[in-house]
Image (tube, grey):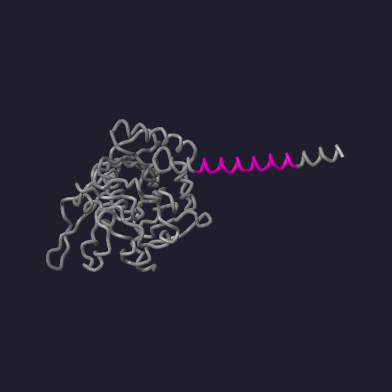
Amino acid sequence: MCVLFLRLFFVKTTRSLSLCSKSAQSLLRLITARGHGARAKNKEPMDSNTLYYSLDLVSGSGHALNGEQRAALQTSLVLLKKNYKFNRVMFWGKILGIKEDYFIAQGKGHDELKDKQFLYSFNCMEWHLLPPADDAMVGEVSRAAKGRFMGDPSHEYTDYPLKREGDEATEAVELIKVTEERRLAVTVHLIDEEVSVVPRGAFNRTHLGLMNNNRCFEGLSHAEAGKLENFLHFAKPKKLKKKLIQEQADLDPSIDFLDPLSDDVPKGQWSLQLENASSVCVLRSLLWMGLTFYHVPMTPQHGYVYFGYGCKNLDLPFML
């Protein structure tokens, strides 16, 4: 009887301990998950803190950096933020060249939309500011620069314009010369202007007209993440004022001040997919092939990165 009593006591004690250990493990998982969620709210996309995590989410498109480049970026982005007095600095992408590749970083000031500058590097450690792109520079680059990037900022592209006099074409004396550094500035500007993406509600506009990061943004739901109209162009709106009054009545002025991707022409230039067992929403641009946007539903985590040749897909209307 004593032996039987001891066995029953041992079994009950073992079960109680196992239940306690399972409860403790569940509690530990809950605390850890909440801790990760709280820290994720304070992290910015593609900055030094979330660089590894963000690159892993877009790795399905074949975008990757080796360990040396990741380590160098994680250190140099912090130094860029301090030296140039940016509010935040993000890794923007990589433009592939024939001789060398350009690594691009983006620094932002008080206004997320207007106060931004781009820098480029060859080794992810030494950075150089890109000149701001204007309409005149865009016109010169579109006429002179053709083909792939060489990987040399001092390389010059030359255009031989033609002046038409009646039915005869005579070659003009004045030549248009554009350095690759200026072409790089224009290409980065156009990509960021045309295909940069943010989820709806991630940014809000203050009464002073400044656009800031929305700290109350908790992420899109899984149902919202599957609709293209819930993603916006992170650029100055061009089509918002052209909407009908009835359509503008349903918009929230504090968050609906950007153009949605669903209004883009031609239709079908965005590929929307749910990856990693529908835990990550991934958008890919077919106009600037190489740009990938990610968003984790029900979390504020989102960002985009560009890996490509810096050439616009002008054949897209004929491919759809």
Note whether residue 200 is visible: yes
Answer with left or right where residue 264 lies relative to residue 74. Answer: left
| Residue range corresponding to the magenta coloring | 12-33
- In the rendered image, residue 108 lying in the magenta stretch gets the answer no
Indicate the quadrant where residue 238 lies. Answer: bottom left
Answer with left or right where residue 249 lies relative to residue 303. Answer: left
**Percent position (x, y) of residue 40?**
43, 43
- Residue at image coords 82%, 39%: 5
- The quadrant of the rendering that contains the N terminus is top right
Compare residues 72 and 157 and report the one nearer the observer.
72
**Percent position (x, y) of residue 246?**
24, 69
- The quadrant of the rendering that contains the C terminus is bottom left
- Residue at image coords 32%, 57%: 232
Compare residues 131 and 56 and report the one nearer the observer.
56
Decide: is 50 above or below 310. above
- In the rendered image, residue 23 lying in the magenta stretch gets the answer yes
**Percent position (x, y) of residue 84?**
28, 33
